[in-house]
Image (cartoon, helix red, strand yellow):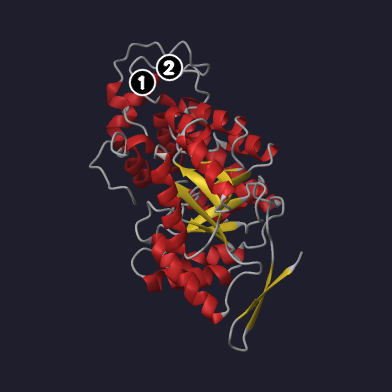
Amino acid sequence: MKKLSIQTNSTRRIQIKEVRRTFGNGRKVSLFTLGTMRALASEAQMYAVLKEACLAGINHIETAPAYGPAESFLGKALERLRKTGLQPKGGWVITSKLLPGVGLHEGKQQLKSILKRIGIKRVDNLAVHGLNRADHLDWAIKGDGADLFQWAKDKGLIGQIGFSSHGSFSLIEEAIESNRFKFCSLHLHLLDSKRLPLAKLALQKEMGVMAISPADKGGRLQEPSKTLIKDCAPISPLELAYRFLLAEGISTLTLGASIPEDLNLAKKLARAEEPLQEIEKRSIQNLHEASRERLGNTACEQCQACLPCPNNVPIPNILSLRNLLIGHHLEAFTKERYNLIGRAGHWWESINASACEKCGECIPRCPYNLPIPKLLEETHAKLVDSPRRRLWG
């Protein structure tokens, strides 16, 4: 394992063992990726976070035009760090994104603006930001998106193409199987691993796989319930989640930091790519067994057999929230997610459990004999609340 030598203009030299994982056919990336959507208060905030990320052994940055001033702040922070001589060995690897559906001319202008804001001539990785619907995939592989990516490659403005997705299992699978992308960003979590097979498929195809917000979207693990802390003991829920995903071979985990201290755990785990230790395996087993005991015979196994619903109720996703609520006592997180339904466009579901008319079509399809309409009604009653605003968009 190589050592990463970071030299500043002062006499201080920092030695960090370098751990990098393959990411598609691009440059290798650190186990953690700095997400820039939480350092938006000021240029000084972005600089402090970026500097700490470098000291933590991170070389990969994830940003997007949709993150408000993130790219402008990032560009100024990178310039300031260059002047101090502080940067990862081999330089930063940068991923940015474009929303799907733009025309060719507009897309060209948007990409040029990305490069200008960040202060670079070429972005290593360009992703479709939210490949969430079938028309998004068509745009990317057949429409203006495909033409845009080819133009950008011919001009040397981008390295490899990928996508992030909050879409359905089948849509993501189709995107991976298209062989048109070299990396993907997916919701991959310790407490809800239903998309892990998609990550494995992508890795088999030698794609890079980035886990989207495994802490916050994984159950707000930075603020875990007392139940979750007890179930994961003696390891913290967040550390256990990170170790689980890294041991599964996920290329890199995004970490959205707003202050340097948010990177402490990433610094601790910067070289933690080894298989799970026995104590970690026992903690994960205890975690799942405790959840099973609380849910009893009402746990939804996320098999999707109940679909399609005549009223388009997203049964598995809603019952997944019920699993987290009852199995792990994640009330704040599940309420927040449930009340985003219908308020986040194509980034999340549009129909909640109140649309269930108790027709019963789903019941004989369920191999676990769940009383699905009753569980949906119960979940709605427990979780419906005043909506919360999304972090961005």
* Residue 312, disc: 1
Q: Residue at x 69, y 61 (%)?
A: 19
Cβ atoms under marks 2 and 1 closer than 8 Å: yes
> Which amino acid type is marked by label 1?
Asn
Categorize mark 2 by other alpha carbons within 10 Å: few (<14), some (14-19), many (20+): few
Residue at the extreme bottom: 11
Q: Observer-nearest residue: 251 or 225?
A: 251
Q: Is residue 9 above or below residue 339?
A: below
351 left or right of 316 in image: left
Image location (x, y in percent) of residue 71: 42, 61
Q: Is residue 345 above or below residue 376?
A: below
Q: Quadrant of the N terminus?
A: bottom right
Local SS, label 2: loop
Q: Quadrant of residue 337?
A: top left
Q: Residue at x 59, y 63 (%)?
A: 59
220 left or right of 83 in image: left
Using the numbered discs, state the Cα–Cα distance from disc 2 to disc 1 in whole angstroms: 7 Å
Q: Residue at x 40, y 37 (%)?
A: 101
> Which amino acid type is marked by label 2?
Pro
* Residue 74, disc: none
Categorize mark 1 by other alpha carbons within 10 Å: few (<14), some (14-19), many (20+): some
* Residue 308, disc: 2
Image location (x, y in percent) of residue 172: 53, 32
Q: Is residue 188 visible?
A: no
